[in-house]
Amino acid sequence: MSGEANEVGTGINLFTAGEVRGVARWFNDTSDVLSIDDDDLEETIAFVSKGGMTFLSPILPDLKGIVCTAGSRESHLAILSRESDVPCVLAAELTGTVSDGDAVTLDLSDAGTARISVGAGVSA
């Protein structure tokens, strides 16, 4: 990872995808998904705090990646993520702050553990 990136968490890597870079956006409930007009989600890494985030289903294929603070390899979100071929980090333990608009890098090169970094030096 380049520049001033700071590791802010780790989690279960759902599938190996190398480095995935994008822009963080928190989705807390259905209204966050419904409020999207024609937003460009291609660079968005969605952050959610529950494993069963089925409300992401309508936008999931448009996302660059997903980070969830709960869930397992067998969770509904994991199944949808694999079917849509969207990189996903589950059971993420965030040790730092991730805010909407932060440049984020997911290091998904290890088959088991994902690393989450944010920072000005991480270009989306």
Image (cartoon, rainbow, N blue to C red):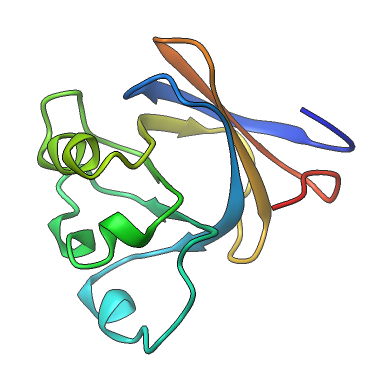
Q: Is residue 22 left or right of residue 66?
A: right
**Residue plotted at (32% across, 24% down):** 14
Quadrant in which residue 36 is drawn: bottom left
Q: Is residue 84 left or right of residue 114?
A: left
**Residue plotted at (24% across, 41% down):** 81
Instruction: Estimate the x, y position of residue 120 in percent, counting from the top left.
Output: 84, 51
The one of 39 and 74 positioned closer to us in this rendering: 39
The one of 11 and 60 positioned closer to us in this rendering: 60
Quadrant where the image shows the N terminus = top right
Q: Is residue 39 left or right of residue 2?
A: left
Instruction: Estimate the x, y position of residue 59 in percent, counting from the top left.
Output: 27, 65
**Residue plotted at (11% across, 26% down):** 74
**Residue plotted at (29% across, 75% down):** 33
Q: Is residue 33 left or right of residue 5?
A: left
Quadrant in which residue 2 is drawn: top right
Instruction: Estimate the x, y position of residue 69 in percent, counting from the top left.
Output: 36, 39
